[in-house]
Amino acid sequence: DTAVSQTPKYLVTQMGNDKSIKCEQNLGHDTMYWYKQDSKKFLKIMFSYNNKELIINETVPNRFSPKSPDKAHLNLHINSLELGDSAVYFCASSQDLQDRGPETQYFGPGTRLLVL
Amino acid sequence: GQNIDQPTEMTATEGAIVQINCTYQTSGFNGLFWYQQHAGEAPTFLSYNVLDGLEEKGRFSSFLSRSKGYSYLLLKELQMKDSASYLCASMDSNYQLIWGAGTKLIIKP
């Protein structure tokens, strides 16, 4: 199936640990994103990335780092996890915006992170 | 600053019509998106407006007024499966989506 997939779906870990969330899209899209959705349901953009540019939301702590081995993957690595990092993290993808204007974003199923 | 406002929660009856309003204020404007998010699931795309007016797609319609910074999502012939959160998002001049907190729609029989 063509889709945006994320693993793991659930992640429970201790404060201070380092963890990674993986994202893959087979839609042939050029741009990928990471969002954080907190308990109040706000979707906040963390990163957007294509093969030309990484755009970082300046409010994101540098403990969070995106890693893209290729165009179809954008993983999220988190160092020294804190209680406040507990949230749902969504990966999304869209076609390259620069050439054709706004394009719909397609979301992965989300990763529910709980830091104890 | 950038801001998206929409009601936190609305209740409607099965078979009825409901309108969910959204006002936006972003740095530049490249269109207004509506997404549906069922509890525990990912947001899914519903509609996109960049020109003023009404876009109709089946039971769902979306309206945009750029001069007023205003949009609404209209849902007709409500079904129980329409119970979900509806997220309004404005795309700014950097093509970043600025999201509202979502409107939780509760459908009653």
Image: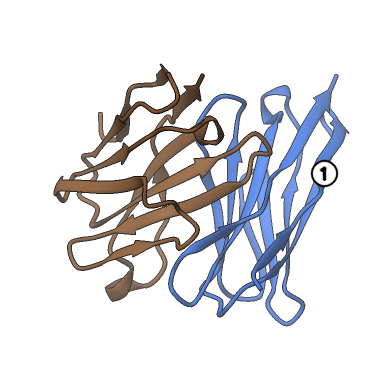
Chain colours: A brown, B blue
Task: Give the camera-side residue of A48 and B10.
Answer: A48
Occupied quadrant, residue B109: top right
Question: In which chain is the residue bearing label 1?
Answer: B
In the picture of the structure, the residue carrying the numbered disc 1 is: B18
Q: Which residue is painted at 56% across and 24% down in the image?
A: B40
Residue B105: % across, % down: 77, 35
Q: Which residue is painted at 68% across and 47% down in the image?
A: B101
Residue A31: % across, % down: 28, 57
Task: Give the camera-side residue of A60 and B8.
Answer: A60
Q: In the shown orientation, is residue B41 left or right of residue B8? A: left
Occupied quadrant, residue B13: top right
Name above or below for residue B41 compared with residue A66.
above
Q: In the shown orientation, is residue A54 left or right of residue B14? A: left
Q: In the shown orientation, is residue B61 left or right of residue B97? A: right
Q: Which residue is painted at 80% across and 27% down in the image?
A: B107
Task: Give the camera-side residue of B9 and A64.
Answer: A64
Judged from the image, the secondary structure of the residue bearing numbered disc 1 is: strand
Q: In the shown orientation, is residue A103 left or right of residue A39? A: left
Q: Residues within 10 Å of mark 1 (few under 14, many from 20)?
A: many
Name above or below for residue A22 compared with residue B3.
above
Which amino acid, mark 1? Val
